[in-house]
Image (tube, rainbow, N blue to C red):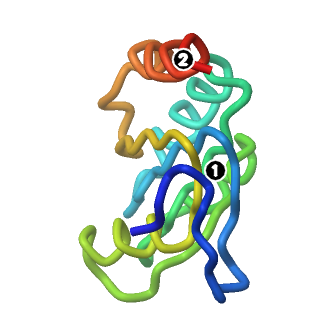
Amino acid sequence: MLPTDGSADTAADNVSRSRIAVLVPCYNEEAAIGKVVAYFLAVLPEASIYVYDNNSTDRTVEAAEKAGATVRRERHQGKGRVVRRMFTDIGANIYAMVDGDATYDAHSAQRTPAEERRRS
């Protein structure tokens, strides 16, 4: 896992840096992913939303892109593999990992960035 203080010096060309990253592992979440992305973008407009598709057979990718997420794919099946890939690819100061089925309330994620800003 990469350090969260921005000090990682990595050779990986695909590492992205953003202050707040919302990571969403997905497998066949077409019905809810658009709502999840829109909800987190509305509540955390400063965040980058990354949806990692794990070989969905529905239109999860299209729905996530339409809602405004950056979509990436993990071809090796399994949530553990997706989670490892997300944290390898994405560098951020603050991470929020949520499911693509609208399980989590985006408003609860506001507390962490607010607390981080107070410490700055």
Instruction: State whether residue 31 is above or below residue 42.
Output: below
Label 1: state its secondary structure: helix
Write down the quadrant of residue 103 in the picture: top left
Instruction: State whether residue 10 is above or below residue 96.
Output: below
Q: How many residues crowd mark 2 within 10 Å: few (<14), some (14–19), many (20+)? A: few
Where does residue 67 sit, x and y in percent of width and height?
70, 40
Considering the image in quadrants, where does the C terminus appear? top right
Q: Which of marks 1 and 2 is nearer the N terminus?
A: 1
On screen, residue 23 versus residue 66, left or right, reads left
- Give the camera-side residue of 39 and 1: 1
Considering the image in quadrants, where does the N terminus appear? bottom left
For badge 1, the amino acid type reads: Ala
Q: How many residues crowd mark 1 within 10 Å: few (<14), some (14–19), many (20+)? A: many
Where does residue 11 sit, x and y in percent of width and height?
65, 88
Instruction: State whether residue 120 is above or below residue 7.
Output: above
Kindly identify which residue carries mark 2. 119
- Give the camera-side residue of 20 and 60: 20
Label 2: state its secondary structure: helix
- Give the camera-side residue of 120 and 54: 120
Instruction: Write the residue at 62% across / 55% down.
Output: 6
Kindly identify which residue carries mark 1. 63
On screen, residue 49 versus residue 119, left or right, reads right
Instruction: Write the residue at 39% across / 45% down.
Output: 97
Labels 1 & 2 near each other (Cβ < 8 A): no
Instruction: State whether residue 109 is above or below residue 67.
Output: above
For badge 2, the amino acid type reads: Arg
